[in-house]
Image (cartoon, grey):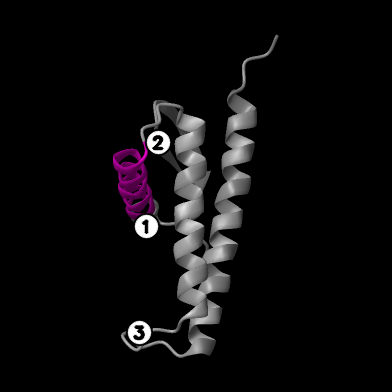
Amino acid sequence: MANRPERVKIELLGTTFSIQSDEDPEYLRSMLLFLEEKIAQVKDSVPLADPLKISILTSLLIADELFKSRQEPSSESPLSRTDNDLFSEEVSEITQRLIRQLDAALTEEEPSD
């Protein structure tokens, strides 16, 4: 049985919006907490006030961590390389689905002229 789409309110970098997603709201909240921690890490290391630049740098930081984790399978990880690849594909699919939903939600909320 598919999850029923739920709306989740997002507040990041002075912007508030809602998305509708089939994902578990608790899972989305944990992703947002992770993102907030990464944003704080960027803000602590770079003196920027522009939310767009902060979000781009945060995206680059997360992408860097993902790429490095793909290149160097850790002995600490119980996952084999194949399992890591499958996990990365699943994360990528979920991320792309959330991006599409964000784009759709933001397009709906844009004020008309």
Q: Where in the figure is residue 69, as x and y percent of width and height?
A: 45, 74
Query: What range is drawn magenta here?
Result: 29-46
Earlier in the chain: of badge 2 and badge 3, it is 2
Q: Residues within 10 Å of mark 2 (few under 14, many from 20)?
A: few
Q: What residue type is labelled 1?
A: Tyr
Residue placed most toward the observer, 45 or 27: 45
The verdict on residue 48 being magenta is no
Instruction: Tell me the tag on residue 64.
Output: none
Q: What residue type is labelled 3?
A: Ser
Residue 47, relative to residue 3: is it above or below?
A: above
| Disc 3 secondary structure class | loop
Instruction: Tell me the tag on residue 9.
Output: 2
Q: Mark 3 points at which residue?
A: 77
Residue lying at 45% horizontally and 90% vertically, measured from the top left: 80
Marks 3 and 1: in contact by CB < 8 Å? no
Instruction: Tell me the tag on residue 27.
Output: 1
From the viewer's perspective, is 13 left or right of 101?
left
